Image (cartoon, coloured by chain):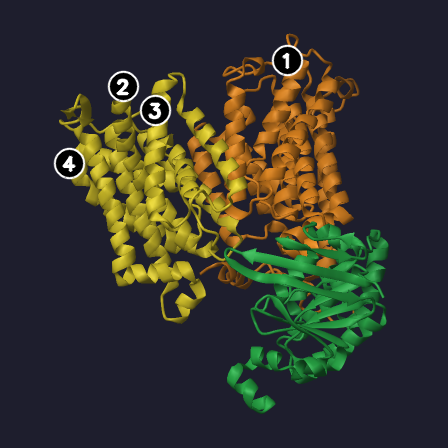
């Protein structure tokens, strides 16, 4: 029983990180109508950046996070402004192809720079935690959950309480109307993507402290974010949070209960469920028809 | 006279709202029936139910003896029901001729490829687009796009043609031309149901009119009679104005 | 040029700096040139046979070039097949590689001495059938989805099928299957694959000029309108999906025999997946020769790069950049330059860019 509770706690903790991954993805999809196949790559870039700062400059990963956020923000802005903005009005699958191409370039660039060895970020306090009623709560994972929560709250605050957020939501609601009231579409699009990239980067930084990373480790996160967003319904932050936590739970529990279950199986099952859900309810489990 | 189309007690709900509530009326073979009503009355919903785009929640729709409520659109088209859309939906990458030919390839006509193009030319002649057959859709004006929409539906050789606000967006001269086209189509033997807002058209070409309001049949009769009906005036213009008009 | 009026601006192609040419004549010339080149290229490998040797004919191509040609033919099949669903019907599948893998495994299992042990010809005949049946089955639910959902659902399906296959012992598990190696069979497989390519192009042409083709294009342009004029959209979509699956599966089957090895990584390779899409789009989605052009151009490019550097990562980066460039600058593909109303000029590029940008 205690083992079960332990796994539940761990599952929720990692679920928090999954929420951070999914939030950026959901933002870009909801506002820009872009399914960003390079999202996982952005996560991994954040992870590598954190590792770099830790391994070469001895910066504590949690202190590095803001730096990572800024760098990814700039990168995301440039990417959207220079490339993705050019195909926004093209048929949907062109953006899929483009982001897939971006993904290829980023992942393989990382392979060239860092090779495929596994790296991890291990500050002095990794591995230690505290005990509550016989359940071990690792410091790092708790902190990761905390940061993820902060990120979700920050995005929520940005969207709902700032003028920029209002502009972003306006663009998401009706792009042409937004332009007519004077909103600079190119800028707002780039801004939205930049925010999402920053979230992805921070998520990546958190992930680097929890698991070993390699350039191709980002792929499952893209698919996973897709599943979380679709099951929860596009544009509903609460549902995304629930979705991320549930995914973390199910994954952790599943892997303890069936030891042979590799990461591949988990995604495959998630996809089968996803396709079934989409067929029955094209708007996702909790979503509304647009 | 047995009705070609028989709508009986059709109900269609969206969420909690009944867009159609027990609507019933018949359309006789060879008629031009007008369907009018203020915006939101359920006219297009009705059309969608008849053409198979929606499945009614209750009631029955019978066409030429076949029960068509809830059937898929292509099967209804095959039986001989054609329709146009309020916001035209042309096949943008094809030419005018190809658009019409696709109608002839499918629908009740189901012609082989070569004959479909011949039929397309005939239909384009009928709506007055013969000279524009090889033009791409993108170069057409709004009235022409509407004509194309009608041509494509006609090419399926329908016995019943449902026209959804085919006059919308046309200036008075264009309305006259479109009116003439409707008459020509009717003369070729097609029964027509015309959803319209332009009263001049309704009065000019429909022998009988059905009025819908909030999803229900409000009145039925000749254009003149229906337009003088106090309830109809009230529905369109509001209570106060209706009282003033009818004199009270 | 004759003394009559010059052709109207919509008929001429102006290549900056060069003379004005009549578009239709240019197109015919190019087609002829391409056909001639193709025939020569396809006959050249015959110089590598013993018969040619005994006749004193010099060998014009070597083994590696024959291998490249075979791969090009394989991609012509896959790109043309994808084009049926993605280009004609407008349903951009991101999971067609599932059919490749299913066809490959079907064939491998069929010829395997410890499994079905059927003759090679039968195995190849079976290769299209399993993927087609699978496509008909999953197509019914999947083709109800649109846009992003359809794309990712098909991607997920391909990933899932690959995972399942990897875990079944009868299918070789994680190791894979090893069809028997045939010696001196380079030419056999080349011409088998070329035959498949010809079949794919033939099928595409038949479809494009048929009621079926018009119905598919109508679905792409406006599915709702297609339905009310009498197109059975479900049947047509699933039909196109199944035909594409059969062709792709055929390519997979021949590949498995040719390569004498098939495993999950090869059969459900996401690389192959994206390449067939890129080829169709680069060449011109929705056209007949677009996928062929794209397959030839891209595969030759890839093969040359692969030879140049043995670091696959640079090839991948190149592929990614090419994807970006194609999608941004050539949305209608290379074929559009020879089609209606375009000019090989910067102004046209700039205009099409403005259409798709925000």
Q: Tag 2's secondary structure?
A: loop
**Callout in the foreground (1, 2):** 2
Q: Tag 3's secondary structure?
A: helix
* Residue B93 in view of the camera: no
Residue at image location 72% in from the left, 65% down from the top:
B25
Chain the render paints yellow: A
Chain the render paints orange: C
Q: Is residue C173 left or right of residue B8?
A: left
User: Residue A170 or A89: which is nearer the viewer?
Assistant: A170
> Would you call the spot at circle 3 few (<14 residues within 10 Å), some (14-19), or many (20 or more)?
some
User: Residue A283 or B244: which is nearer the viewer?
Assistant: B244
* Distance Cα–Cα, label 1 vs label 2: 55 Å
Q: Tag 1's secondary structure?
A: loop
Q: Provide the chain ID for the residue under circle 1.
A: C
Seen from this angle, which residue lies furthest front? B248
- Mark 3 and mark 1 residues within 8 Å of each other at the beta carbon: no
The residue to which callout 4 is attached is A59
Residue at image location 66% in from the left, 51% down from the top:
C219
Q: Is residue A25 left or right of residue A93?
A: left
* Labelled disc at residue C181: 1
Q: Provide the chain ID for the residue under circle 2.
A: A
Q: Position of residue C274 (x, y in %)?
A: 53, 37
User: Residue B118 or C282: which is nearer the viewer?
Assistant: B118
* Distance Cα–Cα, label 4 vs label 1: 56 Å
């Amino acid at each position: 029983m205690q083992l079960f509770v332990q796994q539940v706690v761990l599952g929720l903790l990692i679920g928090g990180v999954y929420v951070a991954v999914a939030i950026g993805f959901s933002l870009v999809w909801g506002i820009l109508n872009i399914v960003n196949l390079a999202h996982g790559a952005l996560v991994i870039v954040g992870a590598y950046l954190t590792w770099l700062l830790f391994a070469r400059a001895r910066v504590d990963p949690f202190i590095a996070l803001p730096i990572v956020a800024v760098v990814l923000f700039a990168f995301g802005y440039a990417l959207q402004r220079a490339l993705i903005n050019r195909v926004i009005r093209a048929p949907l699958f062109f953006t899929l192809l483009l982001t897939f191409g971006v993904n290829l370039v980023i992942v393989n660039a990382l392979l060239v720079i860092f090779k495929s060895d596994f790296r991890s970020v291990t500050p002095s306090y990794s591995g230690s935690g505290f005990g509550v009623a016989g359940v071990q709560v690792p410091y790092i994972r708790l902190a990761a959950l905390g940061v993820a929560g902060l990120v979700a709250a920050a995005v929520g605050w940005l969207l709902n309480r700032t003028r920029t957020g209002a502009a972003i939501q306006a663009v998401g609601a009706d792009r042409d109307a937004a332009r007519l009231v004077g909103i600079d579409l190119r800028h707002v699009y780039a801004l939205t993507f930049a925010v999402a990239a920053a979230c992805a980067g921070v998520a990546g930084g958190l992930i680097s402290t929890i698991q070993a990373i390699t350039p191709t480790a980002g792929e499952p996160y893209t698919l996973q974010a897709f599943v979380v967003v679709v099951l929860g319904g596009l544009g509903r932050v609460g549902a995304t949070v629930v979705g991320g936590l549930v995914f973390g739970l199910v994954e952790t529990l599943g892997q303890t209960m069936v030891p042979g279950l590799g990461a591949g199986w988990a995604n495959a099952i998630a996809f089968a469920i996803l396709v079934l859900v989409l067929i029955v309810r094209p708007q996702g489990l909790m979503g509304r028809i647009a | 006279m047995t009705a070609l189309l028989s709508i009986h007690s059709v109900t269609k709900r969206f969420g909690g709202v009944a867009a159609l509530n027990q609507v019933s009326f018949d359309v006789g073979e060879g008629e031009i029936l007008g369907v009018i009503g203020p915006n939101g009355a359920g006219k297009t919903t009705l059309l969608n139910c008849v053409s198979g785009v929606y499945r009614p929640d209750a009631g029955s729709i019978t066409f030429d003896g076949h029960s068509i409520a809830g059937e898929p659109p292509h099967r209804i088209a095959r039986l001989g029901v054609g329709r146009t859309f309020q916001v035209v939906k042309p096949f943008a990458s094809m030419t005018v001729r190809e658009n019409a030919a696709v109608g002839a390839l499918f629908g009740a006509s189901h012609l082989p490829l070569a004959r479909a193009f011949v039929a397309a030319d005939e239909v384009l002649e009928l709506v007055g687009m013969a000279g524009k057959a090889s033009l791409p859709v993108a170069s057409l004006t709004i009235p022409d796009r509407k004509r194309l929409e009608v041509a494509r539906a006609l090419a399926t050789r329908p016995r019943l043609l449902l026209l959804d606000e085919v006059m919308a967006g046309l200036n008075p001269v264009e309305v006259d031309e479109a009116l003439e086209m409707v008459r020509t189509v009717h003369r070729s033997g097609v029964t027509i149901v015309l959803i319209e807002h332009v009263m001049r058209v309704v009065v000019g070409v429909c022998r009988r009119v059905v009025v819908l309001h909030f999803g229900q049949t409000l009145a039925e009769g000749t254009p003149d009679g229906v337009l003088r009906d106090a309830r109809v005036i009230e529905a369109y213009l509001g209570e106060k104005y209706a009282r003033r008009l009818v004199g009270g | 040029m004759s003394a009559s009026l010059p052709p109207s601006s919509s008929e001429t192609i102006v290549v900056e700096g060069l003379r004005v040419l009549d578009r239709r004549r240019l197109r015919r010339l190019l087609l002829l040139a391409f056909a001639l080149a193709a025939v020569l290229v396809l006959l050249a490998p015959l110089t590598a046979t013993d018969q040619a040797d005994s006749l004193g004919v010099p060998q014009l191509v070597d083994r590696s070039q024959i291998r490249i040609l075979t791969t090009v033919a394989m991609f012509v099949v896959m790109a043309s097949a994808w084009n049926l669903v993605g280009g004609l019907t407008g349903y951009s599948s991101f999971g067609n590689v599932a059919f490749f893998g299913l066809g490959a495994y079907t064939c491998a299992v069929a010829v395997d001495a410890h499994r079905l042990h059927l003759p090679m010809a039968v195995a190849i005949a079976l290769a299209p059938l399993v993927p087609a049946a699978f496509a008909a089955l999953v197509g019914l639910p999947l083709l109800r989805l649109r846009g992003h959902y359809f794309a990712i659902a098909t991607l997920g399906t391909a990933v899932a099928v690959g995972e399942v296959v990897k875990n079944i012992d009868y299918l070789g598990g994680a190791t894979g299957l090893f069809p028997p190696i045939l010696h001196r069979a380079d030419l056999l497989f080349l011409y088998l694959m070329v035959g498949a390519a010809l079949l794919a192009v033939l099928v595409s042409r038949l479809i494009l000029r048929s009621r079926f083709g018009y119905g598919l294009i109508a679905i792409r342009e406006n599915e709702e309108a297609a339905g009310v004029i009498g197109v059975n959209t479900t049947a047509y979509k699933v039909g196109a999906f199944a035909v594409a699956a059969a062709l792709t599966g055929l390519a997979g089957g021949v590949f498995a025999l040719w390569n004498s090895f098939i495993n999950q990584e090869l059969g459900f390779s996401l690389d192959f997946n994206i390449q067939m899409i890129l080829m169709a789009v680069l060449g011109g989605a929705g056209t007949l020769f677009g996928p062929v052009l794209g397959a030839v151009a891209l595969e030759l490019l890839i093969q040359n790069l692969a030879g140049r550097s043995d670091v696959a990562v640079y090839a991948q980066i190149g592929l990614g950049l090419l994807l970006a460039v194609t999608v941004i600058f050539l949305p209608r593909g290379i074929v559009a330059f020879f089609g209606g109303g375009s000019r090989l000029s910067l102004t046209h590029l700039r205009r099409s860019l403005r259409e798709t940008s925000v």
